[in-house]
Image: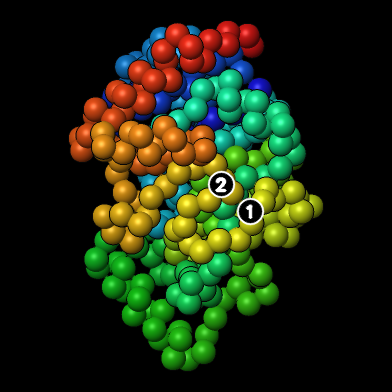
């Protein structure tokens, strides 16, 4: 059995499509919906999954871009799923889609059982500033005023030679992962340490898991290829994310219908991101492709 952990904040019709594509007797699905999402109605999802157990976790956390709240939402998803003792835990965004059938995905993970799928990156010159300096407003990176104050305070610390977390060996990776039950439990057990280290850092969603992995008994189980330049495409976490055409440094490319052949030819299992307000046709095409009769027909629990 596998657990899908989904961070959702909007585009709930699109989320229904994602859930239908993950619906399989070998999967359970756990969804965290941003507490700030005012148009979310859980009743709209009744009956969307016929084979998987679907759970919307509570309490909902208000998630802010770059905030420690993202780490806390991921930990909440892991905590909710751990009683199931799943073979793998896959973190997705509500704006992701699978590119392969569930038969293909499960066959791959059975053949590579025990490996940890995290795409580690070499740090950029600016990366250490996320965790070496105290962040006054850790939820404020996405707002001009609080981000300005954070940067001013960070500059003062740099000028005075003040640093935090001096004893921690930090690592850098993509936020999205597929990890084993053993590593998932280790991460949740380390929650007090994570709060101590990351409560006043910036954009820690790309830092906390690889940092824990490096200090864990699971560090030698990382699936190769290992290190890559940040933003490049490889199979380390099996997710296809196109930063080369990204709209900004914060957001990867949003796939369109003209990307269909590229998406269906890539060896990756999932892709992000999709946006039904930008191009709903590509979402329909991927859905139709995966749900056609020769696609995933597995009904067993």
At horizontal 66% and vertical 22% (from top left) the residue drawn is: 1
Picture coordinates of residue 295, whole percent (x, y): 48, 15
Picture coordinates of residue 202, whole percent (x, y): 44, 64
Residue extending furthest toward the right: 217
Q: Look at mark 1 in the image and give the residue it sits on.
A: 225
Q: Is residue 9 above or below residue 160?
A: above
Picture coordinates of residue 291, whole percent (x, y): 42, 15
User: 10 Å neighbourhood of mark 2: few (<14), some, or many (≥20)?
Assistant: some
Query: Residues at badges 1 and 2 in contact (C-beta under 8 Å)?
Result: yes
Q: Look at mark 2 in the image and give the residue it sits on.
A: 235
Of 171 and 279, the residue lying toward us? 279
Sequence order check, earlier mark of 1 and 2: 1
Residue 35 at least partly seen:
no
Of 235 and 42, the residue lying toward us? 235
Disc 1/disc 2 C-alpha distance (Å):
7 Å
- Residue 138 falls in image quadrant: bottom left
Kindly state the secondary structure of the residue where label 2 is placed.
loop
Q: Is residue 252 above or below residue 167?
A: above
Kindly state the secondary structure of the residue where label 1 is placed.
loop
Of 78 and 58, the residue lying toward us? 78
Picture coordinates of residue 156, whole percent (x, y): 40, 86
Q: Is residue 134 above or below residue 116?
A: below
Residue 292 at least partly seen:
yes
Quadrant (top left/top right/bottom left/bottom right) for the C terminus: top right
At horizontal 62% and vertical 25% (from top left) the residue drawn is: 106
Horizontal relation, residue 214 to residue 196: left or right: right
Residue extending furthest toward the bottom: 160
Q: Which mark is residue 200?
A: none
Horizontal relation, residue 110 to residue 12: left or right: right
User: 10 Å neighbourhood of mark 1: few (<14), some, or many (≥20)?
Assistant: some
At horizontal 44% and vertical 91% (from top left) the residue drawn is: 159
Of 48 and 186, the residue lying toward us? 48
């Amino acid at each position: 059995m596998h657990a899908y952990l989904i961070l959702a904040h909007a585009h709930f019709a699109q989320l229904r499509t994602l859930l239908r594509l993950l619906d399989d007797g070998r999967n359970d699905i756990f969804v965290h919906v941003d507490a700030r999402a005012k148009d979310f109605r859980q009743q709209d999802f009744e009956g969307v999954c016929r084979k998987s157990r679907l759970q919307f976790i509570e309490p909902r956390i208000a998630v802010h871009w770059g905030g420690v709240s993202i780490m806390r939402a991921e930990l909440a998803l892991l905590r909710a799923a751990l009683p199931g003792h799943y073979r793998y835990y896959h973190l997705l965004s509500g704006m992701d889609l699978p590119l392969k059938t569930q038969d293909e995905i499960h066959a791959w993970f059975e053949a590579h059982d025990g490996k940890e799928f995290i795409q580690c990156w070499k740090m950029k010159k600016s990366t250490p500033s996320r965790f070496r300096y105290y962040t006054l407003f850790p939820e404020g990176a996405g707002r001009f005023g609080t981000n300005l104050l954070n940067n001013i305070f960070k500059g003062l610390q740099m000028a005075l030679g003040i640093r935090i977390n001096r004893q921690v060996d930090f690592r850098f990776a993509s936020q999205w992962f597929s990890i084993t039950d053993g590593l998932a439990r280790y991460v949740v057990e380390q929650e007090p340490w994570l709060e101590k280290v990351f409560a006043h850092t910036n954009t820690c969603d790309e830092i906390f898991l690889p940092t824990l992995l490096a200090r864990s008994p699971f560090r030698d189980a990382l699936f190769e290829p290992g290190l890559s330049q940040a933003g490049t495409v490889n199979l380390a976490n099996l997710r296809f994310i196109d930063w080369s055409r990204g709209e900004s440094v914060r957001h990867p490319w949003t796939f369109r219908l003209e990307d269909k052949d590229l998406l269906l030819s890539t060896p990756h299992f999932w892709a992000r991101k999709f946006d039904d307000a930008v191009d709903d046709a590509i979402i329909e095409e991927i859905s139709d492709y995966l749900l056609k009769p020769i696609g995933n027909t597995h009904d067993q629990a």
